[in-house]
Image: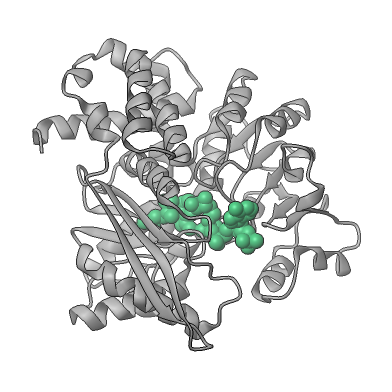
Amino acid sequence: MTYLQDTLARLQQTSPAQTEFYQAVEEVLESLEPLLEKKPHYLKHSIIERMVEPERQIMFRVCWVDDKGEVQVNKGYRVEFSSTLGPYKGGLRFHPSVNASIIKFLGFEQVFKNALTGLLLGGGKGGSNFNPKGKSDSEIMRFCQAFMSELYRHIGPTTDVPAGDIGVGSREVGYLFGQYKKIKNSYDGVITGKSVANGGSLLRNEATGYGCAYFANYMLEAQNSGLEGKTCLVSGAGNVALHTIDKLYELGAIPVSCSDSSGTLYHADGIDVDQIRKIKSDGNASLKDYLSTHSKAKYVARDDNPKNGNAVWHYKGDLAFPCATQNELTEVDARALVEAGCVAVVEGANMPCTRKAVNTIVKAERLFAPGKAANAGGVATSQLEMAQHAGMQSWSEEKVDSKLQDIMHGIYTRSHQAAEEFGQPGNLLLGANIAGFRRVADAMIEQGVV
Ligand code: NDP
Ligand code: 2IT
């Protein structure tokens, strides 16, 4: 596999200190081995060299004035990774940890995720190291306006269409859209995740979590099983986690945990998701406050996590849904899950499992649904939003939900069939990476060297 070592060595030289990006590249390239053995022409076209290099990377300064009248300066990013299959598409993340490596890994993953949906979507990602926590509503608005005052010149409904991610929900998308419209004097479908009042799609907000639960169910159904009655460990307490929990309940499962950056909550009777929403909507409350209404629940503060691990994965569960952030499920956690009899890990977040954790899960022959397959319901529904906006239409919830289910089923089928084709039935990691790569690579070859 010299192409893998060569690629990583070159990236370390040309894009130094981007560890998350190398991790994402390594995972994809490792899966491609059986495909490249059978179809070496991909190497001849230098497809890998081209795919690991974003088509365009934009970094900019974002200056804004806080409520005290002081000038604040943040970094802004938009990595336009691939326009092979459609406009660059992917979310914006506002979190203090954001840096070039994180945005690049997310953009790289997005290319294959979007390809897997079967839709006409390129891949990109952006964001800022701005920390929305503790900011007033007007500070959030001023920041979003300042961010869009630069970003607007790089995006457009057929060029690049951002959306939300960590720290960017429909409020932020609303402010970003408003500023874009003001500058461009045009009501474009230039960003997705908008509220319905602003031309958004019903169910876009719920779509990632719903899609993730649908995917898990398809995966279990293929084993003549299903979510009904299954205990589910879920991490995170944001958009993806809470909508995953909602849909798990609807499909008859029992989600027993959630978490945030401060700690983990476990409730064997099933998480009371309305109470979690109440807590998370109060800026000063903590998940620990749940114990005041549910005395049988348990809370573990972040500082009391197991060594090199995360408490949420050390409870007993049939399935695990990491839905918070990258590398939140480690090798120690994966071993604990396997030992406790967990049958499947379904990635709601992007790259939430470390490389060693993934290897542990796959080696133990547990089902593993990679994020680029399991969490693609969000971006897929973004594309449904783009279609509605372009046609100045608004579809019913039933119509969007039925399309979402079809798309998630298609992603499952493509991943499953590619795994079978390359002699590793059930290995959805391999299947998803090969199916996503092949669609982009074939189109790149047809488009010539551009
Ligand atoms: P939210 O901002 O709504 O929620 C993020 C959650 O993760 C919060 O509970 C947050 O805790 C927790 N979290 C964030 N960063 C950390 C960290 N460094 N350590 C521990 N916990 C952390 O984001 P989303 O739910 O939208 O995103 C969650 C994941 O899903 C991300 O990986 C994102 O890329 C991915 N994703 C999102 C999609 C979408 O449509 N929104 C689509 C596909 C994937 P706290 O509140 O304490 O910060
Ligand atoms: O990681 C992701 O797929 C997202 N944050 C959603 C991207 C989108 O364009 O809807």
Q: Nearer the viewer, residue 74 or 138?
A: 74
x and y percentages locating residue 189 in the rendered image: 26, 68
Toward which corner of the image does residue 308 lie, by quadrant?
top right
Image height of 143 relative to 297, above or below: below
Rendering quadrant holding ligand 1? bottom right
Check the picture and name the quadrant holding the C terminus.
top left
- Percent position (x, y) of residue 125? 36, 53
Marks counted in the figure total 0
Seen from the viewer's position, the closer of residues 101 and 380 is 101
Please say if 76 is above or below 113.
Answer: below
The residue sitting at 57% across, 28% down in the picture is: 358
**Quarter-of-image position of residue 24:** top left
Percent coordinates x, y for residue 150 in the rendering: 27, 70
Q: Residue furthest right?
A: 295
In this orientation, which residue lies closer to the viewer: 254 or 373?
A: 373
On the image, the x and y values in percent for residue 165 come to 46, 59
Residue 207 appears anywhere in the view: no
